[in-house]
Amino acid sequence: MKRVIAVVLILSLFAMGTFAEGQKEGAGEKGGYRIALSNDYAGNSWRQTMIKDWETAAKIAIDKGIVKEAPVFTTNESSAAEQAAQIQNLILEGYDAIVLNAASPTALNGAVRQALDAGIVVVSFDNVITEERAWRLVTDFQYMGAAQVEFIADRMDSADILEIRGLAGTYVNDAIHEGAMEALKNYPKLKIIGEVYGNWTQSVAQREVAGILPSLNNVDAVITQGGDGYGAVKAFEAAGREIPMVMMGNRYDEMTIWKEMKEDSGYETISISIAPGVATIAFWTAVEVLNGTDVPKEILLPPLTVTEESLDFHLENTEPGGVASIIYPQEWVQELIKNWKAGDPPPADPLPM
């Protein structure tokens, strides 16, 4: 049976390849593009916010007549095999573009190549694929680590720093750590005096920080990876220790406790993490490719940085238990593409819509 299905799929894709280009011609003139989000997982607040942001951007595009439909398809258990089958179904349904948050960087490449061969635009983001013919929006996680070090260096001549890392063995954990280590080379008086793994989870971070604190005489600052700042603050509080400058990770509880400390004592920090709204950058990137814009195959995206000036806005616009985000407009994405091609920095985060 599997062989029969494979043969039917191959024949269907071959047929689609002969008319795909004609199907794409003037797609916008026939009532808009059909763009699908293929998502491997929706079991946490970040993914739920991501889907909501996608739907908001899609409604804007639909109301303007740019897009006809932009549904979300999510697999049940972050299964690469299930998502590959999902992509193959989207090919057969004739979507103009597939935007992809992938269960695996490599296991979906075969299905993605089938989509590309059928004339379908494929844009991956967050958990990106390695297929070079697809468009890839890669978050600059090394910048996320370096930015925290730079923030500390701007305010302290010397500092003892505790580093809370993410999930051991993952690309994101390693990239953030490498960015911080590279930046620290420029500041010999800033020193890492302890390291724990918080698994991007407040409860784990609190437990691990509490465990290492008795061995640390002084901590001036804490570098984090997102989802661990609140736990770090609570660990210092429980130990009766002065709370150092803890970098936050854009979660509602982190921004809330930062605001409370800022109002109480002028507490200073930043909050930085990947925004769920990166899905809207991928959405508009797909539209730009379909419109014929020359879009580089890979673009490096900055994480979302919440500053003292933008804290109140992000706190007011983030649901309890959620994550700060931005719904990026089409014009911002057009400027991002233009700047990337010119070798210029990405545009500043847009004000909320």
Image (cartoon, rainbow, N blue to C red):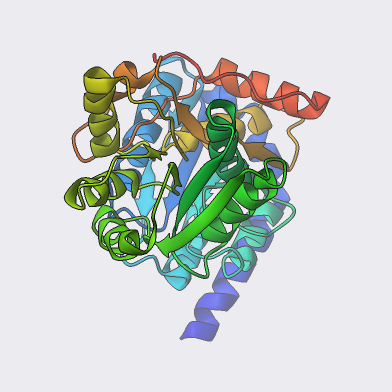
- Looking at the image, the residue that sits furthest to the right is 342
Residue 50 lies, in percent from the top left, at: 37, 40
Residue 353 lies, in percent from the top left, at: 39, 13
Q: What residue lies at 74% left-to-right and 52% top-to-bottom?
A: 133
For the residue pair 66 and 295, the one nearer the viewer reads as 295
The answer to whether 55 appears left or right of 300 in the picture is left
The answer to whether 148 appears left or right of 162 in the picture is right
Q: What residue lies at 58% left-to-right and 50% top-to-bottom?
A: 191
**Quadrant assignment, res 343:** top right
The answer to whether 125 appears left or right of 63 in the picture is right
Q: What residue lies at 67% left-to-right and 43% top-to-bottom?
A: 183
Residue 213 lies, in percent from the top left, at: 33, 59
Residue 179 lies, in percent from the top left, at: 63, 48
Task: Answer whether residue 96 is visible to the viewer in this image.
Answer: no
Task: Answer whether residue 271 is visible to the viewer in this image.
Answer: yes
For the residue pair 64 and 226, the one nearer the viewer reads as 226
For the residue pair 47 and 195, the one nearer the viewer reads as 195
- Looking at the image, the residue that sits furthest to the front is 217
For the residue pair 234 and 9, the one nearer the viewer reads as 234
Q: What residue lies at 39% left-to-right and 65% top-to-bottom?
A: 78
> How many numbered discs sit on the rendered protein?
0
